[in-house]
Structures are given as structure tokens and as C-alpha cells.
Image (tube, rainbow, N blue to C red):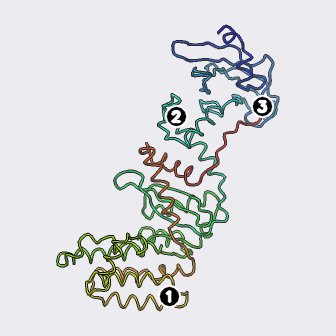
Amino acid sequence: MKDFEHDFSLFQEALEIQEPWYVSDYKVDHSNQVLHIYLSFERGATFTCPHCGHSHAKVHDIVNDDRTWRHLNFWQYTTYLHARLPRVACDLCGKTRTVVVNWSRPKAGFTWFFESEAMTLMKEMPVSAVARKVGEHDTRLWRIFHYYVRQAMEEVDLSQVKRIAIDETSSKRGHHYVTLFVDVDTKRVLFATEGKDATVLKTFKDYLIEKEVSPEMIEEVCCDMSPAFISGIEEHFPKAHITFDKFHVMKIINEALDQVRRTEQAEAPELKKTRYIWLKNQDKLTENQQVKLFNLKDTLLKTARAYRLKLALQGLWTRTFLYAPLYFEDWYTWAVHSQLEPMAKAAKTLKKHEKGVLRWFTSKMTNGLLEGINGLVQASKRKARGYRSTKNFIAMIYATVNKLTITVKPPIGG
């Protein structure tokens, strides 16, 4: 232990402290397993001016309070760096400013080494678990996480964005949602914001303007038939074409079909426990389910008729651009005259949004990508057992879904 307690050069080299800074002292608190390392600078040293970058600014005075930064542990010791920072009076710009140290970013309270390790851990583990591992409050770690995610998102190029998909994902139990805006072509989450009403479209528009991107760049938008999304798009992106997600279209029909089944099964016992055979695609059914469907699908049951309407609408997506409008019109006529009230009501909903339904034949856009993204988001949420705030949840979405390359880099000089 003797060498450890007197060898300043060991810490000087390990910390990679640059001149004119040097290790002036250290103290070991064995009872609490804490190591304090003290840094000072050479007499007559000059520093880089934080205001103009002049490299030979002279020391004006020294800030009285002792600054502290958490560093990576040395062996089993929780390690802190301490220094009193000089202020420099710059001959070039005339400003007097506190110097920026080369082992930490301003006001961080952590060294670059510590932040790099923390970010590596936070991309692999829940932040609460990282906090326990490194002995820091998770609120402080979230500040690190937000800083570097924000820096990485600043580098995302929005200049070529033309086609976006919109969907909401639950942020926590109850009616709490975050709306995602995804670039269909790059599969990147461009923006996420709390809520799922029409105002989220204005928030996204303001974000684009802030990034010096014209909202008129957005040519195509894919979403579900949420009235809030539709009105928001029409108001804030009036030149964009809306494509209604075909999986959402089929969801509307499946819900109507299931409503027919639930009503009919009271007088048709053979329909009990058959919900999934009508809603799933046939190739997803078990062998027993396929047999049961085969015995029921061509009967005179109302549910069987509703199922045939569903299959017919699925056939729409295999039609050509020119024939699709005629096919949809024939299907609509059949559905509204089917004497199946839920199916007729669903058909009228689709008819009201016919332009957006048929826009798929031009844009070929769906929200299938967003389903995959939502799966990643919810898996991350379960792993973390929730997040303290929506802001934290959104930052984790950016980092997880976009697979951000986050590199902690100290500044040149100091």
C-alpha cells in the first residue's frame, strides 16, 4: 500500500490528465472505500479561452469553490476528482471566463471516462440497475443519457424526409400515449411526443421548422383512421397524401366480424370458442382449427357470411391500381346489403375514407414497420419495469429503435 499512497504518477498517467493540469494530492478513505484525487495547474500556465478559443489566455483568478467529478473506480475505490478552476482574462476577446477542463464536459459532474462507461451500460441494462451497479442516483444517470441521445439525434438528417408513418404507443398504464413519427424509407424514428391528439401533428410540424425543414417536404403520410390524426394532417400538412394502413383497415373488418359472431353464438352453440379461427389468417391456424373452419366457413351462418366478406376485402390488396376502385365499390355494395349490421357499418366507415384506403395502390405504405417498432418499445419498457417520466421513455425509444451510435468524446484541448 505504500507505493499506492505516494505515487502521483500512477494517477497522472491513468487519468490522462493534460498539461498544465497535474495530480497534486490524493486521499484514501478506507472505511468508506472512497478515493479522492486532487488536481492543480502549473504556475504561469495559460489556458484556452472558453469564449473565443484563444489558446494562450492568462489566469485572472481562481474560483473559490472546490469542483468535484465522479470518475471510474480505481480498484474497489469509488473515485472522485477535485479541482479549483481558474478564470482566464482573454487579451483577444476581452472576456473573463472559467476554463473548461479536459476531463469532463461543462457542468456534468462526471468525467468523460465515467460517462462513456455509463452509456455503455445503459444501452444494455435498465437505468435503475446501472444506478445500483455504479452507486449513483438514476436521475443523474438519466441526465447523462439525455445529453448524448440529444446529441445523436441532432445529427439525424431530415432534409430528405418525404414519407412518414404515424402511430401511438402506450407509455404507461392507463390512457398515456406517445406518438411516433417514423421515416418510412430509413425506418428511423424522427420524432416522438407525448399524446395522441391532433396537437401532436402541430408539434411535429414545429419540430421540422426548428430543424429548418419545410413541412411541405412531407408528401405521404400513413396512419390509422384516428380522427385526430386525420384532422391534424389536413391542417398542418395539407399537401400530404394520406394512406390508411391496410392492417388497420382489416382490423376494422375483423372487429365487425367478431361482433357478428358474439351476437350469433347465443343461438348457434357451434360458434363457441371459435373466435380465433375467424380472425387469424388460415395459414396461422392449427390443424384442428383449420378443420373446424373448413366445416363452418361455407354454411349459412351469419358469421360465415361475414367471414366471406372479410376474405373478399383481403382480395382487394391483390388487385391492380386500375381495377382496385371497381373491386372496392363491388365489395362495398355487397357489404351494405349483407343484412349484417356490424359489417355494413364497417363498410360505410371504409367508404368514408375510400381515398385513403385506395391510396395504398400508389404509395404502398403500411404501418407494419411501426408494429415492429412498438414491439421493441414495449419490450424495452417491460425490461425497465417502466420509466420515471415520458421524457425518459422517449429518449429510450430514440436510442433503442434508432440504434444510435453514441460516442463519448472529450474535446480537443482544454
Considering depth in this image, is 235 or 95 the residue closer to the camera?
Answer: 235
Say which amino acid is labelled 2. Answer: Arg
Disc sitting over residue 324 in the figure:
1
Say which amino acid is labelled 1. Answer: Ala
Place of residue 398 in the rendered image (x, y in percent of width and height, measured from the top left)? 55, 52
| Image side of residue 199 versus residue 16, left or right | left
Q: Please name the residue shown 52% across and 91% down the image.
A: 323
Q: Earlier in the sequence, mark 3 or mark 2?
A: 3
Label 3 secondary element:
loop
Give the distance between the C-alpha atoms of the residues marked 2 and 1, in whole angstroms. Answer: 56 Å
Q: Is residue 125 above or below residue 400?
A: above
For label 2, the crowd category at 10 Å Cα-Cα, with few meaning under 14, some 14 to 19 and many 20 or more, is: few
Place of residue 372 in the rendered image (x, y in percent of width and height, measured from the top left)? 50, 61
Q: Say if mark 3 contacts mark 2, CB within 8 Å.
A: no
Q: Earlier in the sequence, mark 3 or mark 1?
A: 3
Give the distance between the C-alpha atoms of the residues marked 3 and 2, in whole angstroms. Answer: 29 Å
Give the distance between the C-alpha atoms of the residues marked 3 and 1, in whole angstroms. Answer: 68 Å
> Seen from this angle, which residue lies furthest top?
2
Place of residue 315 in the rendered image (x, y in percent of width and height, measured from the top left)? 46, 84
The quadrant of the picture occupied by the N terminus is top right
Q: Say if mark 2 contacts mark 1, CB within 8 Å.
A: no
For label 1, the crowd category at 10 Å Cα-Cα, with few meaning under 14, some 14 to 19 and many 20 or more, is: some
Q: Please name the residue shown 61% across and 51% down the image.
A: 153
Say which amino acid is labelled 3. Answer: Thr
Look at mark 2 in the image and give the residue it sits on.
140
Q: Is residue 360 above or below residue 16?
A: below
Place of residue 87 in the rendered image (x, y in percent of width and height, measured from the top left)? 71, 25
Q: Nearer the viewer, mark 3 or mark 2?
A: 2
Q: Is residue 149 above or below residue 344?
A: above
The quadrant of the picture occupied by the C terminus is top right
Residue 219 occupies which quadrant of the picture?
bottom right
Look at mark 3 in the image and give the residue it sits on.
48
